Each structure stands twice: as structure tokens, then as C-alpha cells.
Amino acid sequence: MPSITYNLNIPNPPNSPSSDVPNMQTNTNSINTLVNVDHYTFSSASPSAGTHKKVSLANISNPGVPVGSNGVFFSKLATSSWPFWQNANSVYQMMGANANADAATASFSGFGAFGTVTANYAQSAGWTFLPGGMLLQYGSVTSTLGTPQISPSTIAVTFPVVYSTANIVVSITPICKAAGTSDIHVASLKSGTVATSGFTCNYDSSTTAYVGFTWTAIGK
């Protein structure tokens, strides 16, 4: 951000106008500098002049909601700088990394590997915030074995980002091998295992019919 000088109380009536001219010129030029931070300036070609080219936000703490306003949009330091919305109900992170310490290991840029869930399985995952502060996480777990593909039948999954509450909905979809499969060995979410840090998927037994599964989770 540029350094912007502005002289208050100029012109000053007791002064001769010629005495205040240098300060008035500084103020006039500073207005153009200020406009240029986020807008196209006065000298820009029509119709660009005055329109936004970007929105710059400095990191601040929760600002509260000023009288006469219903909500405020601001930038806050939460692991990195991210946009927030605050209204009379709460403060909502609009997108970006969670403040949890393990966010540094997450793959925010897309669908990227961040480790293995357990021996013989590779895991990829991604995540993003949704409007209203909901956190959507997703991933796939694939066997690195030959035959059997699923062994053991119980597979633990760790979320890339820890949820702040336990109200989480998880969905899983089994992936069959390329040659097809039977409907006998189906994957299911193991009761009582959904937690803020992950969940457990269970096949009814070790099986050669499936090579893994995909999953999605949503919560706060």
C-alpha cells in the first residue's frame, strides 16, 4: 500500500490562500493516490475511471457490526489471510484455510496427496469452505495391493482439516475393479466412528472385488 499524505483543516481561513496552496495541492494529489489503490484513477480512459480494479483488505480482528449496518466484510489472519463476513448472528469464514494447526498439511489448491490412511492404502484429498462457514472435504482411498485389493476390511480415514464440531455428514462410494464386481462386498460407514478428525469405512470382509472408495464430508 502506498504512503498517503493528507493535511487536515486545509484551507485554514486565517491563512492567506497562497500560504495554503502547497498543502491543498498535496491533498488533491493524495485523493488520486488513494483512489488508485483499488480504483481506476481520474485520468483513466472512460468508462474505467472510478470503477474497481480490485479490493484490498488489511488483516484485522473481528470488527463488530457498526450501527446502521447489517454486516461487514473483512480480512482476518487465520493461518493465512482469508475473507470473513460478520453480522448480528456470528462471524463466518467465507473460504480458505481453517485455523487448525493441521491445516498446513492439507491440500487446498485442489485434489492432492497428503499421505496414507493405513498400510497398503494411498489417500488423496481436498477441501474448501462453503458459504455460511461449512467445510467440505473429499477424497479417495485406493489399495496399493494386488490381490486381495481390500485387506483388512476396516479402513480408517483422517480428514486433512479437523472439524470444529462433531455434527458431520460423511458419504462413501465403493470403487470396483475394472473387470466388474459382485454386490456382496459393499462398503459402509462404521457406526460410531465419525469424529472431527476422521471416520472408519468397513467392508463386510476382505475382498478382491473392490479397489477402494471415494468419500465426501461436510460439517463445521
Image (cartoon, helix red, strand yellow):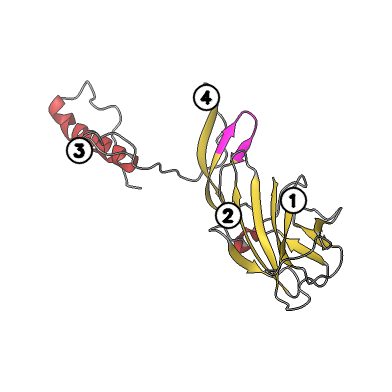
Q: Residue furthest left?
A: 18
Q: Earlier in the sequence, mark 4 or mark 2?
A: 4
Residue 41 image-quadrant placement: top left
Query: Is residue 5 visible to the viewer in this orientation of the structure?
Result: no
Query: Is residue 200 visible to the viewer in this orientation of the structure?
Result: yes
Q: Secondary structure at mark 4?
A: loop
Judging by the rendered image, the residue that carries numbered circle 4 is 69
From the top left corner, tell me how far across and down residue 95 is, in percent. Answer: 56, 46
Q: CA distance from mark 4 to mark 2?
A: 28 Å
**Left or right: 163 in relation to 86:** right
Q: Is residue 171 magenta?
A: no
166 or 71: nearer the viewer: 166
Q: Amino acid at mark 1?
A: Val
Tag in front: 4 or 1: 1
Residue 88 image-quadrant placement: top right
Q: Secondary structure at mark 1?
A: strand
Judging by the rendered image, the residue that carries numbered circle 1 is 170
Instruction: Give the crowd class for mark 3: few <14, some 14-19, many >=20 residues within 10 Å.
Output: few
- Quarter of the image with the C terminus is top right
